Amino acid sequence: MRILCAICWIGMSTSFLTLGTAQAQLPSGWRAHDLNRPAPEVVDPGASPAPANVPSDATVLFDGTNLDQWRDGNGNAAKWKVVEGAMESVAGGGYVYSKEKFGDCQLHVEWAAPVNVQGDSQGRGNSGVYLMGDYEVQVLDSFDNKTYADGSAGSIYGQYPPLVNACRQPGQWQCFDIIFRQPRFDDSGKLLSAARLTVLHNGVLIQDNSEVFGPTNWIQLDEYQPGVDEAPLGLQDHGNPVRYRNIWIRRLPPERPRPVQPYASESKSIELSDEKKRNLSGEYDGFSVENRDSVLFLNHLSRTLEMLPVTETRFEFRKSAGNIEFSTNESGAIVSAKIFLDAAGEKNGTKK
């Protein structure tokens, strides 16, 4: 969309409809920019709050004073301007890109469409936030403004409409909070995992871990291509004076599969005979030990905890911190047990 958007239509013209309906379906079953796709339900997100606080580990990309952290598409000084503590897109100034590069991240962006409404559909308060320069979360004045669903504010452009339309009125400050997971490839370039986006618009969930079909674009669906691990964040010039403020970003560690680990107690568990298990089971003062299919369970404080033997008389709990230890008399018969649970302290019980 970065190239084509400069020539994309402003109104819903007949030529666009002819071109749009010629596209193949998306994996969702819809065609890109299908005007028959249901519009998101409107939700009132409430009044604009004060600018959000910046976490201590965040990188501030715009603090209201200058554009030092931004460049144009050629690496030169950004051609946008700073107005009243906000950075404002300048028609013809081109996209701006962060000097720093990012991959997996948490991004906070506050934006405002022009208070003086001009145009309609995609010609009204249009801009966009690009993760890694390729994956656009649409910025648009979608307040009482009909357009195609997958191009409304908060859409993953051309692919996923927002779950709801949480836009405030033009001129009011809005915010996107975005969790981005970049696509990953194996050494041969095969896609292992698609890019994913979670987005809150004005505090309202509008994209729920949406799996992106490929780089976003106008009218066409692009294929994933192996690329760099990090790339600049981009903001779009679409000819409308959209403003941004309080932009910060947090790098996230890459996701890794979590191997299934046995519980600690399992590694030191021993085998007990069925006869010993039967001798341990029974009622104690304040709790009971139950033998279910040769597995012992403690019933205590309305909880049931699986017991793993580490000796013949001492057990730990399979999933919870704590232990239970049994005492015997001179003949070896079980006479009592003592429970220790971190959250509930100790409990002694004589066997009944």
Image (cartoon, rainbow, N blue to C red):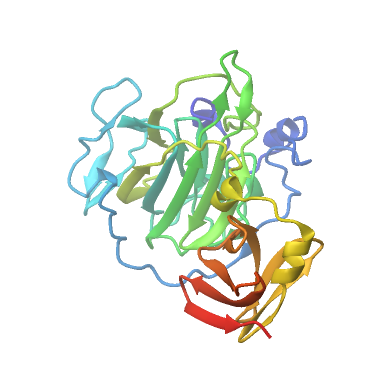
- Give left or right: position of 325 versus 22: left
Residue 148 visible in the displayed image: no
Which residue shows up at 45% across the image and 21% down it? 228
Q: Residue at x 45, y 30 (%)?
A: 133
Residue at point 66%, 39% (across, down): 13
Residue 296: x percent and y percent? 71, 65
Q: Position of residue 187 (x, y in %)?
A: 56, 15
Left or right, 277 with respect to 318, comes to right
Image location of residue 50, percent across then percent down? 30, 66
Q: Quadrant of the N terminus?
A: top right
> Image height check: is 349 above or below 149?
below
Q: Is residue 128 left or right of residue 122?
A: left
Q: Is residue 148 found left or right of 340 in the rendered image?
A: right
Residue reaching furthest to the left: 65
In the image, farthest residue toward the right: 293
Q: Quadrant of the C terminus?
A: bottom right
Q: Quick one: 127 or 261, which is closer to the camera?
A: 261
Q: Is residue 324 visible?
A: yes
Q: Residue furthest front?
A: 330
* Image spot of residue 260 (x, y percent): 61, 42
